[in-house]
């Protein structure tokens, strides 16, 4: 298998010698790779935290923090990134340490272009193979676009993803925090004609106001104190691909004007430059706030809102997704048990009832954290209500009064019975004393009432 240069894999090169960075960048770009270069480990970690990097090529000996420490950091924190080490101080011990720490390849300077390309190709082939195996292993019957969900609200989301992926229109993702907006953005990108180009996710609220313009659009040498070289921004890096602007509501009025220009004219201007340059980037924006309300209050520009609101997809909160919650419990319990080499926990009927009826203000992210806590901190394999967080138990007490309708009580009981037999409708119907057809009709009615 040979890696195609048209896939534009992202490579981060780390070396404290500018000349080496320049040569490696030029050679790797000639093969179609997207190349980032930095002079030290600290800068490398910053890029790894904000950008999807397929391969890190790092020098062995560098001031302050060594390349070996960077290899270890990548292995511990970025499971889908490979590492390759280069050095001008070749020793057997150094090579052994590099491989033991997690570097897939070890090249000694000076090396030929062919040696470099062959090593890079081998490492990326291993990465792609591992990703393919991982996807096939993790895939479940209820998984679509690598997202879990069988409820009708999620089936509509999957349909919206397919339609959005078939176009290049700007997409606005709405929904509470933790509902999976970035997952949807990635699904749209990787199922679109732009799938082979970069997908770059940016948290607009996480970048200081005085840095966001240079981060997004880049800067030229001398643009400000410390700008010793020109540097491309996220929009140039994502050229041909997709930019995901998470929490776009957090951008300032001045940045909103600049984003409006990108959407209108498809061009950007680097900080410190008077020249504009064209970019071919699809924008997917997201927010957990009511943009209509922000527009009405003059906090968000109305013209920018119209530009990003071409295709709007509203993600449902977890509390509106019905038995998807039970699917998530199974998925996360299995995942974290395998990760921590612990037995997969089982949940009592009452514990599942409380979890199922909890409001989940943090949505899927909150549920994931709760299940991980069960796996790591609970000694018993069987989870009872007493093991649940106190806030969740208190919420359950408030919801068991005599203010519910007969239909609500019946729906809850049916859900609990289904949970107790792990979703087996035949067994559930037997316990309930009804036939499968009647059970299906009741479930259908419950699902419609929850939409």
Image (cartoon, helix red, strand yellow):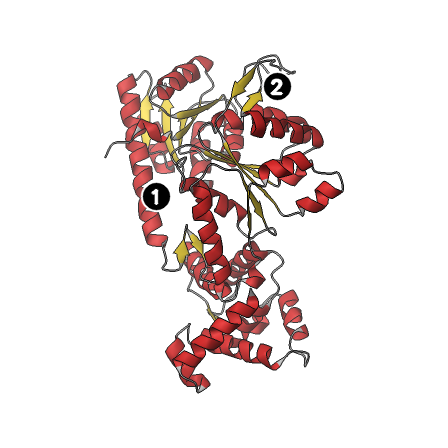
Q: Residue at x 47, y 19 (%)?
A: 16
Q: Which residue is mark 1?
A: 131
Residue drawn at x 44%, y 80% is 438
**Residue at (53, 50) in percent of width and height:** 180
Above or below residue 310? Residue 149 is below
Near-viewer residue (293 or 323): 293
Q: Secondary structure at mark 2?
A: loop
Residue 223 in the image: state x and y as whole percent.
Answer: 62, 15
Q: Residue furthest right?
A: 297
* Label at residue 167: none
Please determine whether, in this image, residue 345 is positioned above or below residue 213.
Answer: below
Picture coordinates of residue 331, whole percent (x, y): 44, 60
Give the class, few, some or many, for how many residues have Cα within 10 Å of label 1's Cα (few <14, many ≥20): some
Category of crowding for the residue at label 2, using alpha-carbon neighbours closer than 10 angstroms: few (below 14), some (14–19), many (at least 20): many
**Of residues 202 and 162, which is closer to you in this image?**
162
Image quarter hosting the N terminus:
top left
> Can see residue 323?
yes
Q: Which of the 4 quarters of the picture holds residue 140?
A: bottom left
Residue 191 percent across, percent down from the top left: 40, 42
Cα distance between the residues tagged 2 and 1: 37 Å
| Label 1 secondary element | helix
For this view, does 118 lie left or right of residue 103?
Answer: left
Seen as rendered, the residue at the extreme bottom is 433
Q: Earlier in the sequence, mark 2 or mark 1?
A: 1
Q: Is residue 89 visible?
A: no
Q: Quadrant of residue 366?
A: bottom right
Residue 271, which numbered label? Answer: 2
């Amino acid at each position: 298998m040979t890696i195609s240069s048209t896939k534009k894999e992202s490579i981060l090169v780390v070396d404290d010698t500018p000349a080496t960075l320049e040569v490696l960048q030029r050679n790797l770009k000639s093969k179609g790779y997207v190349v980032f270069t930095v002079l030290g480990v600290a800068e490398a970690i910053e890029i790894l935290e904000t950008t999807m990097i397929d391969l890190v090529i790092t020098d062995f000996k560098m001031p302050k923090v060594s390349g070996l420490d960077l290899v270890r950091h990548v292995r511990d924190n970025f499971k889908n990134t490979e590492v390759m080490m280069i050095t001008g101080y070749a020793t057997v011990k150094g090579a052994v340490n590099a491989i033991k720490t997690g570097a897939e390849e070890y090249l000694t300077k000076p090396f030929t272009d062919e040696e470099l390309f062959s090593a890079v190709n081998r490492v990326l082939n291993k990465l792609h193979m591992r990703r393919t195996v991982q996807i096939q292993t993790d895939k479940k019957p209820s998984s679509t676009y690598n997202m879990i969900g069988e409820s009708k609200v999620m089936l509509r989301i999957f349909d919206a993803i397919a339609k959005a992926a078939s176009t290049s229109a700007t997409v606005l993702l709405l929904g509470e925090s933790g509902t999976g907006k970035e997952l949807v953005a990635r699904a749209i990108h990787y199922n679109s004609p732009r799938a082979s180009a970069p997908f770059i996710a940016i948290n607009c609220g996480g970048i200081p106001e005085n840095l966001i313009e240079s981060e997004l659009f880049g800067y030229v040498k001398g643009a400000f104190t410390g700008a010793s070289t020109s540097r491309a921004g996220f929009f140039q890096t994502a050229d041909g691909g997709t930019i995901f602007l998470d929490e776009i509501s957090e951008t300032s009025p001045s940045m909103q004007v600049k984003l409006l220009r990108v959407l209108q004219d498809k061009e950007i201007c680097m900080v410190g430059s008077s020249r504009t340059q064209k970019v071919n980037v699809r924008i997917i924006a997201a927010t957990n706030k009511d943009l209509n309300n922000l527009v009405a209050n003059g906090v968000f520009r109305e013209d920018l809102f119209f530009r990003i609101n071409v295709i709007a997809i509203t993600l449902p909160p977890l509390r509106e997704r019905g038995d998807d919650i039970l699917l998530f419990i199974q998925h996360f319990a299995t995942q974290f048990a395998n990760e921590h080499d612990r037995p997969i926990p089982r949940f009592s009927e009452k514990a599942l009832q409380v979890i199922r009826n909890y409001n989940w203000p943090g949505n899927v992210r909150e549920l994931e954290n709760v299940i991980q806590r069960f796996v790591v901190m609970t000694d018993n394999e069987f989870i009872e209500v007493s093991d649940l967080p106190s806030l969740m138990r208190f919420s359950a007490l408030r919801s068991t009064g005599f203010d519910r309708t007969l239909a609500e009580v019946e729906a809850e009981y049916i859900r609990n019975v289904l949970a107790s037999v792990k979703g087996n409708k035949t067994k559930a119907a037997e316990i309930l004393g009804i036939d499968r057809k009647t059970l299906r009709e009741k479930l259908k009615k419950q699902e419609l009432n929850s939409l």
